[in-house]
Image (tube, rainbow, N blue to C red):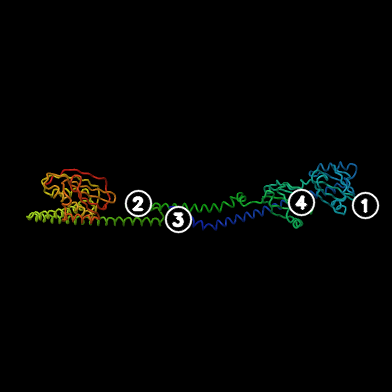
Amino acid sequence: MKAKAAWGTPATIRFRLGLALAITLLPVLALGIAQSVLAFQKDAESREAALVLAAERSAATARARVESGAILLDTLQPQAVGLQCAQRLAEVKGRLPGYVNLIRFDRIGRVVCAAATVPDDDARRDSAWFKKLASGSRLAVAETPAGAFGPEPLLLAASPSYGQDGKFDGAVAAVIKLESLKPVSLDRSLPFDTQVALLDSAGGYIDRSDEKVFNQPPPNWAGRAPKGAFTYRARDAEQRRRVYAVAPLVGDDLYVAMSAPRQKVSTWAKLNIVSSVVPPILSFILALAAVWVVSELVVIRWLHYLQRIAAIYARGRFTVRPLLARRAPPEIRQLAETLDIMADAIVARDLSLHESLAQKDGLMREIHHRVKNNLQIISSLISMQQRSLGDPAARAAMQDTRQRISALALIYRALYQGPDLKRVDLRHFLEELIAQLIVADGSEHKVRTEISVDDLTVDPDKLAPLALFTVEAITNAQKHAFKGRVGGVLKVSFRVEGESAYIEIADNGGADPAELGEGVGRTLMMAFARQLGGKASFFVNDDNGLTARLEFPTPGEPKGKTTKLGRNQAAA
């Protein structure tokens, strides 16, 4: 069985069962997909939350370093004076990683001593951070541009220094590397390809690990930055979708930003294929496969088996029984039993029909036999009457009538003796008819016959006028062609050419077509031709004899090749 793709056409049981189960399982599959989508969204939210926590954790770590720097400055206040100030500050800086310089400034911003070289800056006392300390702030944090305290941007944390009179006497500052404040992106808790950056109070980037990722400032900076940590989504310079998290690092002066790729559904599905994607799809496929296999084992193979049994029955072999169906399901077994009962009924009916046909065949043969016997009785009565007549013309008329009746009797004999009651072998029939006519002539002269007949079977309705036409033609040759002669040649040919058939009876007796006149024989021959739907013609042949020709539509199909016979028949 093959499923047809066109709508409205029949489909196989296997296909229909699979389609029904697929429709039934669609809600389950849809629920699995929905759960996978929810899991993806939840995972995305978790990634964003983890990124924010990482940013806040990194900011807390950086704040701890800055605050530790403030404590260090407070501790260094007594040591940041005296002749060995620079040496002591250099020793402290060498023990603390992440610090670039430790500096002591006086009240007007000049360098008193430092752990490393400090560039001159006459406008230092006017800087915001210095003024902030002078105004009484305990700690001031500021970003320094490249060249201010070193070749790269740095972070300066400073605390005020007071004299014995309690007035502002300068500041002690720690210059910290921005690298030491940036979070470590190699943390395993962070998503893959996490990038970090530091931002100033205006949202500009101070330092960043990848310029393509941090290619534009965070949107709505003025509205979001004062409220604490926040996240946003954007595309980087290569149009990749990413998630960004920003958290304040030191007050409103410094911020840390972290960015991770925004996970796609396909990427997430690959990573979570076993837990979220495979189960619903696998269950769907397994259910369809189960229906396919079960329908094949329980239904389809048994239907194929019964189909083969039905095909055997169609060929007339009803002795085969579907015994293997005993192992089939009850419904299939009932169908097999129905086929078995049907086969028994067909066998019984065929037997009855064969018996009826045999009986009918026997009756028909008996009828033909009795008709032939009756015709022979009539022929015998005519023969008796013929012998009692003295008039030669009357005797000839009776002889013609007897030959016609004998020809009809020969047809019925051919019917009940042949294998088919509806068909007669024309070649064999013409041989017997010609032999019968020559023997019945009673002439003492020898007549040689040549017969060439295509094999053909015809029904009795067509055979009767054909036989009677032949009788009239041969009788005419016997009367006119062979009368008063020692011998002669009688040629009878029958051939089939497509849709037309031809029978010709020719002699070499030198007769003239005018000798036929308008007598009974010619009239009968023309009538027989019309009865066959053909036409009769008479002409002188190459042997200076008369040829009677009948052309008519082919009454049946040829059985084989043309058979030619040549023999001498002695007149009785």
Where does the image place residue 15, in percent across and percent down from the top left? 47, 54
Tell me what residue is drawn at x 70 percent, y 54 percent: 232
| N-terminal label among 4 and 3 | 3
Disc ID at residue 11: 3
User: Between residues 467 and 58, which one lies in front from this camera angle?
Assistant: 467
- Left or right placement of residue 335 versus residue 229 in this view: left
**Which residue position holds label 4?**
204
Disc 4 from disc 2: Cα separation: 90 Å
**Which residue position holds label 1?**
165
Q: Tell me the element at label 1.
A: loop
User: Between residues 432 and 151, which one lies in front from this camera angle?
Assistant: 432
Circle nearer the viewer, 2 or 1: 2
Tell me the amino acid under the disc marked 4: Gly
In the rendered image, is residue 491 in sight? yes
Whether tag 1 and tag 4 are in contact, CB under 8 A, the answer is no
In the rendered image, is residue 429 in sight? no
Disc 2 from disc 3: Cα separation: 25 Å
| N-terminal label among 2 and 3 | 3
Tell me the amino acid under the disc marked 3: Ala
Whether tag 2 and tag 1 are in contact, CB under 8 A, the answer is no
Tell me the amino acid under the disc marked 2: Ile
